[in-house]
Image: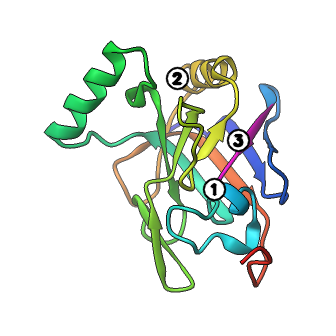
Amino acid sequence: MYAVTVKGRFYLNKADVAPLDFPGVGRFPAFSGMKKYINQPGCTYLRDDGAIPYGNYWIVDRPVEGYRTRFRESLSALFGQDIRRDWFALYRADGMIDDWTFIDGIKRGNFRLHPVGPEQISKGCLTMLRATDFSLLRNVLLNTSTVIVPGTNLLSYGTIEVIGYEDYCPVL
């Protein structure tokens, strides 16, 4: 087993753009969440609109979706739109390493690391503003040693710590 060599941090800073920092790789502009909830640490319980919740996340391969999703993605790729097969999944280290977590009793999940797409949205994903930055980070992740996520058979390329917590959502 190898040690995780790529470790990043994302700061929920209440601004439109927040730093996604990978020491030795780069600091990249990113965002998480929708509309007035972008990068708001107190609003992470809001399904789809809220930012990714604070905590530690394993960077793993994005799970293979169903037939319809793969068909839609093939069409999107044909027309030059975002290519989701290049994305990574972010699994929260919360005792159940999977695509879901609970924040204040609200089920959240499907967190991804990806470049901004044509719609410029982030339903709780970590969304990088520049496709070139995502390509650089993706290349680093794919060329690093992997580690088995404890208690699973998943291989992880690294981790991201999401920093920022508030007890309430100030923009409701």
- Residue 115, percent from left and from top: 59, 30
| Among numbered discs 1 and 3, the one appearing first in the sequence | 3
Disc 3 on helix, strand or loop?
A: strand
Crowd tier of the residue under label 2, counting other residues whose Cα lies within 10 Å: few below 14, some 14–19, many 20 or above: few
Which residue reaches farthest left? 67
Q: Is residue 19 left or right of residue 63?
A: right
Residue visible at 64% across and 69% down in the picture: 44
Q: Nearer the viewer, mark 2 or mark 1?
A: 1
Query: Along the horizontal axis of the image, is 51 left or right of 86?
Result: right
Please, is residue 80 above or below residue 44 in the view? above
What residue is pinned by disc 1?
33
Residue that carries the numbered disc 2 in the rendered image: 142
Q: Residue 100's x, y, as percent?
A: 42, 65
Q: Which residue is mark 3?
A: 7
Q: Amino acid at mark 3?
A: Lys
Quarter residue 39 falls in: bottom right
Task: Give how far apart the Cα atoms at labels 1 and 3 are.
Answer: 22 Å
- Assess disc 1: are there few (<14), some (14-19) or many (≥20) residues with their C-alpha within 10 Å of its C-alpha: many
